[in-house]
Every structure is written in structure tokens, then in C-alpha cells.
């Protein structure tokens, strides 16, 4: 499971740092453009939610949903899993600034929702299995 977790973190890292995620997913072309002195002017900018890409939000949700499920296979400490996953979400948004991409509050929100949905579903799974075992 640790191997899968490391692979998934690597995939998230590649998605975070590549210049265009859509191109990555469509043509598997990975291109990095590192900026050692990024423009912090757009850091966590807010804009109208109507301008939020549903494709991008779904991607963030899925990436961090899966990450959280994998983390929960390694640790049963929900608090540690949540803190680890949300911290990694914030880290990836900050990291994007250094790769000519913007850090987006809505991305962090989608990541965090993915984290909490995963924790909730895994918790329900355990409750369900305990209920079934008690019968």
C-alpha cells in the first residue's frame, strides 16, 4: 500500500508541476517551467465561483479523495490523515506558483472536500462492517 501511496503522490506532484494538466491527460506530454522568483500577486486570488472549471474541481476532488483513501490504509488516525492530506493540498497549491501556475482557493476547497468525503466513506465502511459482524 505504501508503494501505491508513493506512486499517487508522484502523480499528484507531476500534475501540480506540469505546465498544462489537460495536455498531460490528453497526450501524456509533461512539461515543466520552473520560476525561481514567482509572481505572488495572484496567490490564492478569489474570483467568481461561476468561473470555476468543473473539470478542474473534479480532478482535485478525485486526486485528494484517492490520496486520503490510501493514507487511511496506512494509518487509522483520522486526525493525522486529514492534517496530512490538507497540508499536502496547500503545499501543492503553493508549489504551483513556482511552475508558472496560479494557486487557487477553490482548488484547496475541492481538495479538502475530497479529503473529508474519503474519511467519511471509510468511516461508514468500518461502521457497516462492525454492524454486519455483530449480527
Image (cartoon, rainbow, N blue to C red):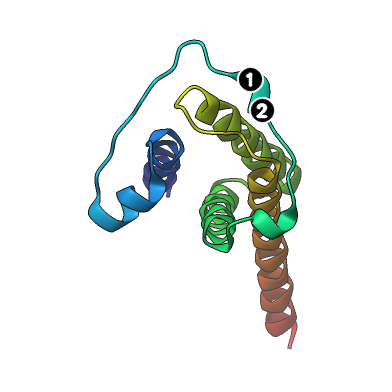
Name the spot of residue 99 as percent of width and height, x first. Answer: 44, 26
- State whether residue 34 is above or below residue 118: above
Label 2: element kind: loop
Q: Residue furthest bottom?
A: 135
Residue that numbered label 2 is attached to: 43
- Tell me, for residue 40, which label it has, or none: 1
Please tell me which residue is depicted at 42% across the width and 50% down the height of the picture. 1
CA distance separating discs 2 and 1: 5 Å
Q: Quadrant of the C terminus?
A: bottom right
Q: Residue at x 74, y 80 (%)?
A: 131
Q: From the viewer's perspective, is residue 78 above or below residue 33?
A: below
Please say if the residues under marks 2 and 1 sit with CB atoms less than 8 Å apart: yes
> Which of the labelled discs sits on residue 81, or is there none?
none
Rendering coords of residue 56 (x, y %) = 53, 55
Q: Residue at x 75, y 40 (%)?
A: 46
Please indicate whether residue 35 sits to the left or right of residue 69 in the image. Answer: left
Amino acid at each position: 500500500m505504501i508503494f501505491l501511496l508513493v506512486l499517487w503522490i508522484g502523480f499528484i506532484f507531476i500534475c501540480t508541476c506540469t505546465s498544462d494538466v489537460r495536455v498531460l491527460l490528453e497526450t501524456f506530454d509533461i512539461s515543466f517551467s520552473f520560476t525561481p522568483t514567482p509572481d505572488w500577486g495572484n496567490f490564492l486570488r478569489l474570483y467568481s465561483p461561476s468561473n470555476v472549471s468543473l473539470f478542474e474541481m473534479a480532478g482535485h476532488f478525485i486526486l485528494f479523495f484517492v490520496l486520503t483513501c490510501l493514507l487511511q490504509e496506512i494509518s487509522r488516525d483520522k486526525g493525522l490523515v486529514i492534517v496530512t492530506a490538507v497540508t499536502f493540498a496547500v503545499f501543492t497549491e503553493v508549489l504551483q506558483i513556482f511552475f508558472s501556475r496560479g494557486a487557487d482557493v477553490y482548488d484547496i476547497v475541492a481538495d479538502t472536500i475530497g479529503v473529508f468525503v474519503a474519511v467519511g466513506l471509510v468511516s461508514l465502511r468500518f461502521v457497516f462492517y462492525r454492524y454486519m459482524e455483530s449480527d
